[in-house]
Image (cartoon, grey):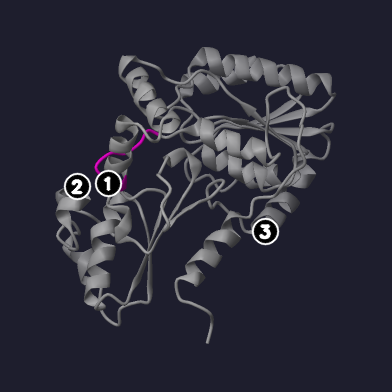
Amino acid sequence: MAYNGLNRCPNILLGATLASARRPSAEQLQPPWPDLVIGASRRSVPIARWIRQQSGGRTKLVHLLHAMAPLDLFDLVITTPQYRLPPRPNVLHLSAALNRIDSDRLVTAGAAWAPRLSALPRPLAALFVGGNSATYRLDADTAGRLGAEASAAVGAAGGTLLVSTSPRTPADAADALVKGVTCRSFIYRWRAGDPDNPYHAFLALADRFIVTADSASLLVEACLMGKPVELFSWPMRRGPLLRLKDWLWSQYGMNASGALAVTIDRLVDWGLLKPPRDFAALHRELRARGLIAGFGESETAARRPLDDMERAVAAIRGLFGPPA
């Protein structure tokens, strides 16, 4: 879907409409109307609601992550810990994002890259580097420290560090990271559209992973490999406005029965207030499942593999009752 400027209006005001969609996109939407619409992003909500309206209310609406719209408009909302949605009967809280990687793609990438990496001593530790976000800033000092500390750990084990940056890695941070790496290594700096990107090969071939705390996707995809994953974290952005937000959301989380917590709960439920993402909640959930440890820490719990996709699919199927 392509959108016009009206998509910036609050969803609670837009209602069920195609007014926020550009004409070519809107014209694609024709009957027969589907039994199910799965939407993602705030902007898709008015269009999903319009489709249900055209179906006479028959179409089931499922929304992913957060909607910035009243939660009771949906048959099911599937979300993850960092989005801080309140508990509701139609809200399914998963452990982590629904990232999945095609196993054939992993096999193909691993086979293509195995000869190129075969001379490197094991263990192979893949370092996946994110970058700047609303929550984190990866500056040159932090990136340099990451390179040095990862090198020291991998070098002490006699292994090799496989480094991959990402689209969000700032150039100065990537420079500092590379400069900080002193052990035996293979370093890939992300390039747009590069057919020789080794990311999937690193997932397939590495013995363990180090992942920066700013990226839910990189972290989940490493966890899906069933190998040890260490989380490299650093202090989050914390200006005066963010500190105020931290205080407000701590009240929401710690005092759910208080007047402020109830008010925030209602505003989030109506889609009028978007909680700041809570990456610490995601990290706690993955730790509790034994899937990650802090950088330099030993694993302390048995691994419980992610079953979020199965839970999500079961919940969606449940909207339609038992099979005929």
Check residue 103 in the rendering and tell me which mark sits there, or answer none: 3
Question: Is-magenta flag for residue 271?
Answer: yes
- Expressed as whole percent of the image width and height from the top left, the position of residue 208 reads 74, 36
The outermost residue toward the top is: 141
Point out the frontmost of discs 1 and 3: 1
User: Between 86 and 273, which is closer to the camera in this rendering?
Assistant: 86
Type of amino acid at the residue the image marks with label 2? Pro
Type of amino acid at the residue the image marks with label 1? Gly
Q: Which stretch did the figure color magenta?
A: 269-276
Type of amino acid at the residue the image marks with label 3? Ser
Label 1 to label 3, Cα distance in Å? 37 Å
Location of mark 2 (residue): 10
Which circle's residue, 1 or 3, is located before the other in the chain? 3
**Left or right for 252, reference 300:** left
Kind of element beneath mark 1: loop
141 relative to 12, above or below = above
**How many callouts does the rendering have?**
3
Kind of element beneath mark 2: loop
Point out the frontmost of discs 2 and 1: 1
| Residues tagged 2 and 1 counted as in contact (Cβ below 8 A) | yes
52 relative to 195, above or below = below
- Expressed as whole percent of the image width and height from the top left, the position of residue 70 reads 28, 52
**Residue at the location (68% across, 53% down)?**
106
Name the image quarter holding residue 296: top right
- Expressed as whole percent of the image width and height from the top left, the position of residue 165 reads 56, 32
Name the image quarter holding residue 37: bottom left
- Expressed as whole percent of the image width and height from the top left, the position of residue 311 reads 57, 60
Point out the frontmost of discs 3 and 2: 2
Label 2 to label 1, Cα distance in Å? 8 Å
**Residue at the location (79% across, 20% down)?**
155
User: Between 12 and 163, which is closer to the camera in this rendering?
Assistant: 12
Which circle's residue, 2 or 1, is located before the other in the chain? 2
